[in-house]
Image (cartoon, rainbow, N blue to C red):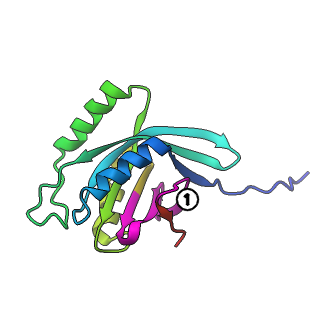
Amino acid sequence: MASNSIHSSPSYSFSLDNTNELHLKRYIETRKNQEILGGLIGDIKGKTKKGLEFAIKSFLPFPNMAQDKRNFGDLSSLWFEILEEWRLYNYPKLKFIGFLHSHPNNSSRLSVQDNSFAVSLRERYGTMLFIIIGENVTLRCYLFKNETPIIITGNCSYYKCLLR
């Protein structure tokens, strides 16, 4: 007997609580013309009504070592070790789930460099979020699970989450 069940693809979302969103807002406002980058620590909540949810609990900014702060310099592999030690010390039950990055003078779309960096993170750590905040405080969240990134939505009040 053939099964008539329909298999739908899972949906994904991210959450950022109000406290972390406010801290992030203040951090970005103090660096309006600088590109920022940092690690996201959190948890992946299992199946909910909305599907799989990436719950962001903390953000660890990395210093921008570039001469021109409107761009981000090369990221040392040492920062991944620092991120992991910081996570283990402060949030041992949580995991590294992605990166947040800004484009202060550009859109929140993935650049070629962003895509390449996110793919390398996925290969090293598994499924990754890659959040980009662009000019005019717009935000896009990309999920790197397979070869093609998926745009997902989240529960932000300050940031305008874009779907395209």
Name the quadrant containing residue 96: top left
- Residue on which the image places disc 1: 153
Is any atom of residue 109 visible in this view?
A: no
Q: Give percent across and percent down for residue 89.
A: 30, 25
Q: Is residue 15 left or right of residue 128?
A: right
Q: Which range is magenta?
A: 131-158
Could you say where residue 71 lies in the image, as x and y percent from the top left?
19, 66
Q: Nearer the viewer, residue 150 or 36?
A: 36
Say which of 35 and 82 sits in front: 35
- Quick check: is 154 in the magenta stretch? yes
User: Which amino acid, by three-letter code, is at mark 1?
Assistant: Thr
Query: Where in the figure is residue 147, as x and y percent of width and height?
Result: 45, 62
The residue at 47%/65% (across/down) is 148
Instruction: Pick out the residue farthest to the right.
Output: 1
Residue in the image at 26% along x and 63% along y? 32
**Relative to 163, is 146 above or below?**
above
Residue 10 lies left or right of residue 135; in this view the side is: right
